[in-house]
Image (cartoon, rainbow, N blue to C red):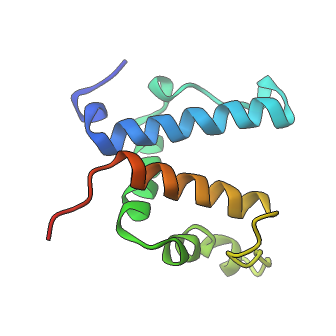
Amino acid sequence: MLHEEDTTPIALTAGLIHEARRVTDAIAVGPAHAGRPWEDQSREAKARTIALVERARGEDFEGFYEFMTLAIRMAGRPVAPSTDTDNDLVRYARMIHAVVHALVPPTSG
């Protein structure tokens, strides 16, 4: 069920990105791993995706990729450089960043 807060450009873009991820997961590892549809996500889960979209909106790609990989790096695991376009995480981050910048109006100021 859509709530009023789900109709902002940022929330609509977050929903689109969530659904794109579900399709990718279903293709890559099977439908059982696709997760629940956007409208069935908890407010907390939606808020996390919306925060990711807001971050992508306010950063260039390098800054966004640094943010997106922060938890991985803090866990001591290596991440591919942002220029490694053969890497799945880099491609996913680039997709999110491009979609957000194409669909969400820029902030004024």
Closer to the camera in the image, 6 or 81: 81
Q: Quadrant of the C terminus?
A: bottom left
On the picture, is 26 further left or further right than 74?
right
User: Which x, y percent locates residue 4?
Assistant: 22, 28
User: Which x, y percent locates residue 32?
Assistant: 79, 25
Q: Residue at x 77, y 72 (%)?
A: 84
* Res. 14 image quadrant: top left
Q: Quadrant of the N terminus?
A: top left
Question: Can you name the residue that lies furthest to the left here?
Answer: 109
Q: How many marks?
A: 0
On the picture, is 4 further left or further right than 89?
left
Closer to the camera in the image, 68 or 48: 68
Q: Residue at x 58, y 71 (%)?
A: 65
User: Which x, y percent locates residue 47?
Assistant: 39, 47
On the picture, is 12 further left or further right than 82?
left
User: Which x, y percent locates residue 102?
Assistant: 41, 49
Above or below residue 85? Residue 103 is: above
Question: Can you name the residue that lies furthest to the right here?
Answer: 29
Above or below residue 88? Residue 73 is: below
On the picture, is 102 further left or further right than 8?
right
Q: Residue at x 76, y 75 (%)?
A: 79
Above or below residue 53? Residue 33 is: above
Q: Residue at x 61, y 60 (%)?
A: 93
